Image (cartoon, rainbow, N blue to C red):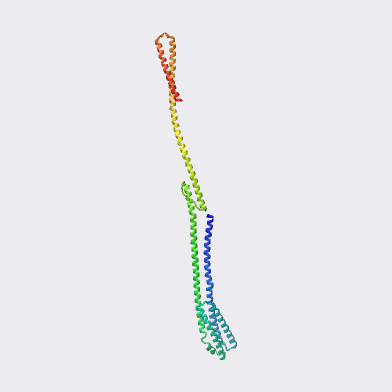
Amino acid sequence: MKLSVKLPLAFMAALLLLLLAALFGIQRLNQALTVYETTVAQSFGHERRAAALQQDFKVQVQEWKNVLLRGKDPARRDRYWAAFQKQEQAVATTATELLSDLPPGPAQDKVRQFAQAHERMGAAYRKGYADFQAAGHDPQAGDNAVQGMDREPSQLIDQAGELIGKASTEVAAQAARHASQATTISLLVMLVVCTASVAGALVFSRSVVRPIGRAVQVSQAVAGGNLTVAVPVGGRDEIALLLNALHAMQASLSRVVFNVRTNADSVAAASAEIALGNNDLSARTEQQASALEETSASMEELSSTVQANAENARQANQLAVSASTVAERGGDVVAEVVTTMRGINDSSKKIADIIGVIDGIAF
């Protein structure tokens, strides 16, 4: 695979891993937020509603006290009694809603017990109101009818509020733990993804840097004259193409160097043959020079002989003239002439021998 494809794919893979890790973290945090919104918020709503129920119940009890204390005035008595009934209905409605919203458990049981006690308390308060009116609006008569009736529901709603508050605290703590776990898991996932990305980057960098370093080593070796260094060939990316080109260049340079060495050997052999020819030619030249020196010496000897022959011929001519004029001298002179002619004959033979030698040397 080519680097032009590897690089975008590696970047996209790393980006995808980071995106998946981010989505996982967001999903975990959303789960924690959903738990908070559904469970914690609901639990806090229960706690607020229980507190409101406690407050409404206290207001209801206070309205009953207002009826007893200010009931001699008909207008005020009717107003406070109507307020008491309204508050009683509000407490009953809130208790019913809270009872339906609470999950099964001790808190729900306490609210149910409170609702039942509150209903009994309402009946007792109505009887007390009737006794209060029958006694000429005597507060003591009305109070004796309901004395201690608010203690049980008050304790029950307080206990329910404590249980609901404790449950809210536990739910909040659990939600916090879930959020912390979600954050920790998200961080771990991000760490794993980052580690995987770094490891992938190192592997990818190694797959790119090592072949490039090998290509640099091969180039340096070839530049240093080493044409036998091994060139790894393989792959289809740009670095593989570079190594293939280096391998082809190395093979081409090897062939060129081999051809140069072969031609150099041929030139060296030819030079050696030329040197041998030159040496032979020099020897032959020296022989020719020696032969020429011998020829020159022979020519000088021949010149001397010719001069001697000329001198002898001149002397013979003089002798012949003398002989012709003094023929009468007799046999002694003839003998001298014969002797002289023999010398001439010998000289002529020497000349013929010298000429033969010269012909042998020259041809």
**Residue 142 versus residue 101: which sits nearer the camera?**
101
Q: Position of residue 299 (x, y in %)?
A: 44, 22
205 lies above or below 77: above
Q: x, y (%) of residue 154?
A: 51, 82
**Residue 324 against residue 363 in the figure, above or below:** above
Q: Residue furthest bottom?
A: 135
In terms of image quadrants, where is residue 74? bottom right
Q: Nearer the viewer, residue 43 or 105?
A: 105
Tell how many labels: 0
Q: Nearer the viewer, residue 89 or 227?
A: 227
Q: Is residue 281 above or below residue 138?
A: above
Q: Residue furthest top?
A: 328
Q: Position of residue 59 (x, y in %)?
A: 55, 82
Q: Position of residue 121 (x, y in %)?
A: 53, 85
Specify whether 314 is left or right of 119. Answer: left
Q: Is residue 313 above or below residue 48?
A: above
In this view, the residue farthest toward the left is 332
Name which residue lies at 50% across and 70% down.
178
